[in-house]
Image: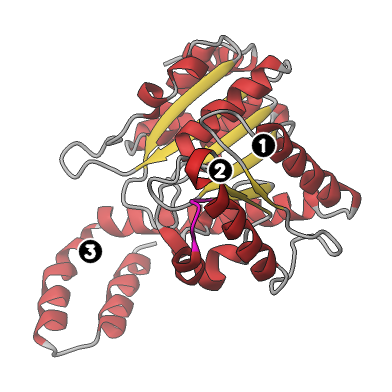
Amino acid sequence: MNVDQLAADVVRGDRRALARAITLVESAREDDQQAAARLLELVLPRTGGAMRVGISGPPGVGKSTLIEALGCHLVDRGERVAVLAIDPSSPTTGGSLLGDKTRMERLQASERAFIRPSPSSGMLGGTAPRSRDALLLCEAAGFSVVLVETVGVGQSEIAIADLVDTVVLLLPPGGGDELQGHKRGLLERTDVIAVNKADGERAGDAAQTRADYQSAARLFAASVPGFAVPVLCVSALDGTGVTSLWDAVRAHRQALFDAGLLEQRRAAQAERALWHAVEQALLAQLRAHADVQAALPAAVDDVRAGRTSATAAARVLLSRLSSRG
């Protein structure tokens, strides 16, 4: 693969090149990872210009439908929109189970949109191992808005806050139990709350849920001092509230910028990404190191039999990693 040419194609906005580039960074092969590192270095100066927005929420709340409605709204306004949809991984193939391209046909038809489903690969927190790299590539390709749809995993789904500028929590109407279920974890990392399916017979329930969450939102510190977390009703089905939702997202990002916190947030995210990459690299070295592999069966047996603790066994394996440099 000519990585320099691929980088040039991505920067000029070639959607097929962007798809190939994301496939490259998602590959677990060592040679592909070396090429991916080179690719990211080449495009890095072109990154950082997009609005980064995460859409989170429980399964079945309508995240994909809302993202399509929001994406079409933004495309009509002249934006270029990339959607990174994190899907549950197939235990058989490791690929995406759901494939959001099949659920966003109207948005997919636009030349100003790009939709990429990626497998979570068992990663906790609702994102995928290479979500940040994929987001950077979308920015390099000139997309002005990147929407990240997380796996619906409930209150533990907070890794999205390490990827985006603004986290939108999407909720179903009638959510007294939902409020209890989300508790502090996800709510504390949420910047905008939207109650979906606020149409027809569910409109009243949606209004009540909105009131419940408006009360709850006051209990948590906002990501920007003085910025009250907006809570609003939307309908992905008929488009009600979609414009207001985007206005709320823009208002939050502007508040971050005005407070000097946008670059701070992104810098902290980049630092956490560094440590995640270090952890992944060390794990790969452990798995490939001959001395570690030689000691591994005995360590596993000792831990399973209760002859040693997992912590002590791990220290032994790590000492093998550093024994020969």
| Above or below: residue 248 compared with residue 169 | above
Q: Is residue 273 visible?
A: yes
- Secondary structure beneath dot 3 equals helix
Q: Is residue 36 left or right of residue 227?
A: left
In the rendered image, residue 32, in percent from the top left (x then y), is placed at 38, 31
| Location of residue 225 by image quarter | bottom right
Name which of mark 2 and mark 3 comes first in the sequence. 2
- Secondary structure beneath dot 2 equals loop
Q: Is residue 306 left or right of residue 271?
A: left
What residue does disc 2 label? 198
Mark 1 Cα within 10 Å, few/some/many (few <14, many 20+)? some
In the rendered image, residue 91, in percent from the top left (x then y), is placed at 19, 45
Question: Separation of disc 2 and disc 3 at Cα?
Answer: 59 Å
Between tags 1 and 2, which lies in front? 2
Mark 3 Cα within 10 Å, few/some/many (few <14, many 20+)? some
Which amino acid type is shown beneath numbered disc 3? Asp
Q: Which mark is residue 291?
A: 3
Which amino acid type is shown beneath numbered disc 1? Gly
What residue does disc 1 label? 241
Question: Separation of disc 1 and disc 2 at Cα?
Answer: 9 Å
The secondary structure making up most of the magenta span is: loop
> Which is nearer the eye, 325 or 19?
19
Question: Separation of disc 1 and disc 3 at Cα?
Answer: 59 Å
| Above or below: residue 109 compared with residue 81 | above
Q: Is residue 142 visible?
A: no
| Above or below: residue 58 compared with residue 119 | below
Mark 2 Cα within 10 Å, few/some/many (few <14, many 20+)? many
Q: What residue range appears in magenta?
A: 171-175
> Which is nearer the eye, 78 or 217?
217
Residue drawn at x 13%, y 82% as measured from the top left: 302
> Which is nearer the eye, 240 or 111?
240
